[in-house]
Structure formats: C-alpha cells, structure tokens
Image: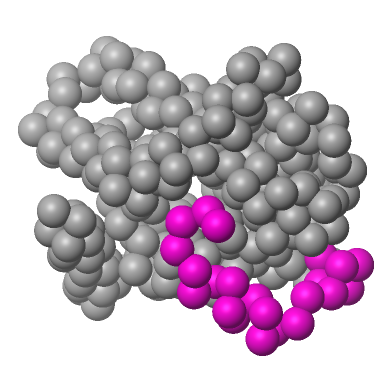
Amino acid sequence: MKSIYKSLKFIIGLGILCYFIWFIATGWDHEQFKRLLYQLILHPVMVISSMVIYGSSFYLKGIATKKLLGDQIKLSSAMYGLWYSLALNHLLPIKGGDVLRSYILYEREGLSKSASAQSVIIVRLMDILSLCLLVSLGISFVALENPLSTDVILVVGGIILLVIGWISYYKRQFLYQQWNVTLSLIKGRGFSYAFFLVFISWILEAALLLSVCIATNTGISTFQGIWVNSLTILGQVFQITPGGLANYETIMAFGLNQFSIPMETGITIAVLTHGIKFIFSYSVGLYALVKYPISLTLIKKLSKRKGGA
C-alpha cells in the first residue's frame, strides 16, 4: 500500500511538472513577466516588509516548538533548526529538513531523541491541520465567488487525501512507537498555545503573495491570498523538484485562477513569489550555517533519513 501511495504521489507530481513545462513552452508571456518584475522592483519597501512578516511566521513556529516542549529549550535552537530546514527543503527534491530540526534540538539542547523528533513531527502535523482548516474554510468563499467546478473539487480533494496518506504511512507508525512521549507533549500546557501560534503563522506567510499582487496591481483580497497560499503549500505533498519548483507555481496559478486571474498572470505571480522565497530561504540558511555550523557531510547524512528519528 505504501508503494502505491508513493507511486501515485510521484505520478501526480510528474504530471504537474510536465504541465508546467508545457505551459512555459507554449503560453509563457515574457513581456508580461518583465513588466510585472519591473513593477515589483519599484516597491522595495513593500517587498522587504513582506519578507519581515514572512520571517516572523517562522519566529512564531519557533516559539510554538519552545512552548510545546515546556520552555525547556532556547528559542535560538528552534530557529536554527527552522532556518536549516527551510534552506534544505529548497535545495532538495524532498522535504528533508525535519530530521535536521530534530537533530539540532537533540544535539544543542540535550533532549532525548524521542522528544526532539516528536516535537518536530507534532509541529509539522499542526502545520498540516492549520493549512487544511484554512483551505476548507476558504472553499466556501470560493464557492461564493464562483460555483465550485469539478477541477476545484478534484484538486482540493486529491491534495487532502494525499496529505492524509502522508500522515498515515509516514508518521503514524513513528508516533505509535513513541506513544508515551507523544501523549506527554499533547497533554502539555503549551499544546493549545503552540497550535494557535502555528495557525497564525500560516496566515502571516501569505504576506509575500499579497505584496507581489499589490505591487503588480493584481486584484486579490487578503483572505483570497491566504487561501491561495495555503492551498499552494498544502499541495507541496506532490513535490518532486527542489523547493517544489513547477509544483508551487502551477498550484498557485490554479488557485489564483479561481478568482478570475488568468493562468498566464497567475504563473508569473507565482514565479515572482517563489523567487523571493528562494532568496529568503538561502539567506537564513546561510545565517544559520554561520551562527551554528553543521558539516555538509552530516547534513547530507541526516537529509537521507526518513521519519522523524
């Protein structure tokens, strides 16, 4: 069953990649891209401000990790893990950063391997639940704007099913193996507060998309931007390229298209937004490498591990 899930995920991811390549080859408007890029460059304060807000979303995730562990760790340890993870996930075709987050908590804070791994997995599950809630809530608003098409139902339903499959086959066994540690973290006083912080962090993360849309005069409301961003991130379950290239752009353009933004414009908006994310990810990753160096050999070794331990 696990192999079927992996094959299905790969086939869908490959299909999205092929569609993106086909679209770029046949429908890419270079002049529009240059025009929107120029408009974005004319608003440096807005872009920098959105990056600060985007960065603060990770700061909230760091606090959430600290609260989940009962304030047993320094915030800097959680942040180094997040920065390394973000950079690594934009370098690899898979999400390999979670294991590195767990390692830093274990190595720098002296936590048990179980506690460090469980905290990372639980925060990741909070991420997924937050995104599912935002996407599900937004569906009703999409329906108010336009009647739900078969495409929307299939895409959103498929993404949520694949996410459930990811949890079932990759995380459930590990959580069960370490059930006592998992239960102690969930029952802890900081659990609810941690979830609230994670939920808010995903609302803040939409700042990049919204700033690009505002700078390029692309009509989209704040809530629409939050919904599109949440759908895009949730859709990274199909990631088969570094940083989710092609996957990110295609799903974001699809989401924007639900609000009458042409696919051509949506792809351009997504490329610009994703480009800013790449710059941010590598910058904070470099910062973490300088402040808390980890050998590339160890990073490579850890990134190949599966699960959270």
Give the magenta part as a residue range: 288-309
- Please tell me in which quadrant of the rendered image residue 64 appears: top right
Q: Residue at x 62, y 47 (%)?
A: 114
How far across and how far down the image is residue 120, in percent?
A: 61, 45
Residue 261 shows in the view: no
- Please tell me in which quadrant of the rendered image residue 278 appears: bottom right
Q: Please, is residue 123 above or below residue 197 in the view? A: below
Give the farthest residue toward the left. Answer: 150
Q: Residue at x 69, y 84 (%)?
A: 296
Q: Quadrant of the C terminus?
A: bottom right
Residue 17 shows in the view: yes
Foreground residue, 282 or 41? 282
Q: Residue at x 53, y 54 (%)?
A: 308
Magenta span includes 302: yes
Foreground residue, 124 or 261? 124
Magenta span includes 194: no
Drawn side of residue 252 relative to residue 226, left or right: left
Q: Please, is residue 305 above or below residue 138 in the view? A: below
Q: Please, is residue 221 above or below residue 170 in the view? A: above
Foreground residue, 218 or 251? 251
Q: Residue at x 51, y 40 (%)?
A: 178
Drawn side of residue 121 relative to residue 24, left or right: right
How far across and how far down the image is residue 163, in percent?
A: 31, 42
- Please tell me in which quadrant of the rendered image residue 32 appears: bottom left
Q: How is the image coloured?
A: one colour
How far across and how far down the image is residue 208, in percent?
A: 61, 45
How far across and how far down the image is residue 70, in percent?
A: 79, 27
